[in-house]
Image (cartoon, rainbow, N blue to C red):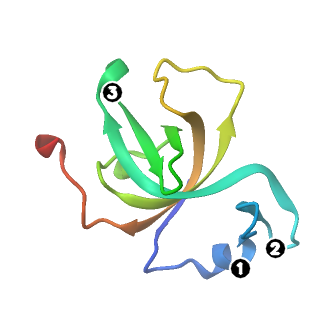
Amino acid sequence: MACQRASEPDSESVQKEQLDPITKSSSDAEGKEQVGMKIITGTIQFKSFEGGFYALDADNGSKYTLRKLDREYQVQGLRVRVTGRVLDDVMTTTQYGDLLDVSKIVVLDDSAITRPADI
């Protein structure tokens, strides 16, 4: 999984990935849209129901259950920009928004994180 901090942009990924401001879909260096990929900005939250899981509360009000979230990003309150694919053909027991298969994360702000003891 490609991961980076917002303050340390990876020039290669910045050049290859372009965001269409209308559709919020991503495209590669040749301008081909990566079908089904979304770029979503929001805050990672730990939800304790259904055995516990990490979710993304998007800035636009959408909610996502995160799949394939690396352990280092499993942090309550972490502001991120996530690139991933919504899986419409998979069911979960979380019943919390859409299931988002994470492929890339950029940390935007870690000043509001809380540790498990604080939750």
In front of the other: label 3 or label 2?
3
Q: Residue at x 47, y 44 (%)?
A: 69
Q: Is residue 31 above or below residue 75?
A: below
The residues bearing labels 3 and 1 have C-alpha atoms spaced at a distance of 37 Å
Task: Find numbered disc 2 in the image and state the secondary structure of the residue it sits on.
Answer: loop
Task: Find numbered disc 1 in the image and state the secondary structure of the residue it sits on.
Answer: helix
Q: Position of residue 66 (x, y in %)?
A: 50, 39
The residues bearing labels 3 and 2 have C-alpha atoms spaced at a distance of 38 Å
Q: Position of residue 91 (x, y in %)?
A: 60, 20
Tell me the tag on residue 73: none
Q: Residue furthest left?
A: 117
Q: Which residue occupies the foreground of this view, 68 or 86? A: 86
Query: What residue is disc 3 on?
Result: 52
Q: Residues within 10 Å of mark 1 (few under 14, many from 20)?
A: few
The amino acid type, in three-letter code, at marker 1 is Gln
Tell me the tag on residue 29: 2
The amino acid type, in three-letter code, at marker 3 is Gly
Q: Residue at x 35, y 44 (%)?
A: 45
On screen, residue 112 versus residue 61, left or right, reads left
Q: Position of residue 114 (x, y in %)?
A: 20, 52
Query: What residue is disc 1 on?
Result: 15
The amino acid type, in three-letter code, at marker 2 is Ala
In front of the other: label 3 or label 1?
3
The residues bearing labels 1 and 2 have C-alpha atoms spaced at a distance of 7 Å
